[in-house]
Image (cartoon, helix red, strand yellow):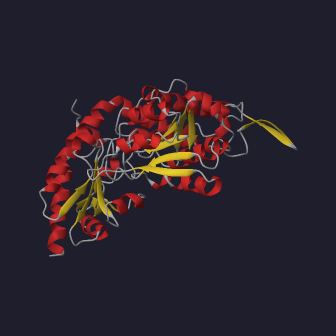
Amino acid sequence: MTLDIARIRQDFPILNREVRPGVKVVYLDSTATSQKPLAVIEAMNDFYHRFNANIHRGVHTLAEEATAMYEQARVKIAKFINARNPHEIIYTRNTTESINLVAYTWARANLKSGDLVILTEMEHHSNLVPWHMLAAERGVQLEFIPVTENGLLDLETYKSLLARTPKLVSFTHMSNVLGTINPAAEIIKLAHDAGAITVVDGAQSVPHLKVDVHALDADFYAFSAHKMCGPTGIGALYGKSALLDAMPPFLGGGDMIKEVKLRSFRPNTVPAKFEAGTPAIAESVGFGAAVDYLTGIGMDKVAAHEHEITEYALERLEEIPGVKVFGPSADKKGGVASFTFDGVHPHDVAQILDRDGIAVRAGHHCAQPLHEKFGIPATTRASFYLYSTKDEVDKLVEGIYKVKKVFG
């Protein structure tokens, strides 16, 4: 199950970059965005060199080839998460747009004042703000599954909330701050038993775990290419066919229509119904190449490697006086270590680490309510991926000791 990390790192040219003379980058910010392998970079370059044309609109050779590449990427993505039909994959810009698509279409068509939506206290803003907007507009009620002190969801409280017959349960599969891997299959089954539809934020899970949307029985599942070795500007929404077919369109314009008259229109079939205008064609090719790359390595191997690195990182960080790591133990989390350092603001920690080329994230990570839950304004976050090494973890620890020296 072990990966040849030295060989894998050769696939990522940016990992050889010196951010300053003699200072090589130590990239520990993969939760924000992953680095891209040559296979993805070259696939997109090749598209622009040899195939660039608009899709679904032309009968000339380039248009037909570009269309085939765009749709073939959809097939790859569907297979990657075990969707039963490629048409259950809707291209979006990112996870945020995917969740908004559900909120603006399914939710506005099906929820009314007083209906209950259940979220969790560990959600990214992209799975909070759309529901706040809906609550303000429609009067739906929002309730939240609490997070325990050790960074897990309080499922007993969840079960009590389900007794109030919610219409929707929306939650993250893996926390971008705590790294917590939530029991998605259990949460979804309990929601279905209560008659609720489920939305899963898979931005952090799809890149790092083997995800099977059919086995999970998820109704909607959202994720982004850029966190899984693919390009920015493209993501996907998986939705069950029956739900997608019944939903109204999201955006109006070209390609999402079957017929337009001066006073009416008929929407196209799924997935075109939700893909208005010229899409991110080259990015879809890159998305497909990223799926090919990860499939070739094996997601079980990716997850096992990240677990090993995360376990090592938590052990090393816990050695440092004044450092507090948030979230559960390594066996219950993905490759994320968010921490505070007594007496030093996370932004100062990150800036001093950057002197040695160590790239981490500092702030509330688009999860302000979660930080408020723990009584802190921000954390420093180191995050790992298939190319991360124990040597990089050691450099992180050495850097934190330098922070300690600077601040006395």
Q: Quadrant of residue 370?
A: bottom left
Q: Is residue 61 above or below residue 41?
A: above
Residue 6 visible, this angle: no
Locate the C terminus and report the quarter of the image it occupies: bottom left
- Quarter of the rendering occupied by the N terminus: top left
Near-viewer residue (110 or 268): 110
What's the residue at 73%, 45% (across, down)? 253
- Camera-side residue of 161 and 279: 161
Residue 401's spot in the image, x, y percent? 15, 65
Q: Nearer the viewer, residue 319 or 242?
A: 242
57 horizontally vs 98: left or right: right
Left or right, residue 157 beside residue 92: left
Which image quadrant for residue 206? top left
Q: Position of residue 26 (x, y in %)?
A: 26, 55
Residue 320 visible at all: yes
Residue 407 on image: x %, y %: 18, 75
Q: Residue furthest top?
A: 84
Q: Residue 202: image x %, image y %?
A: 43, 41
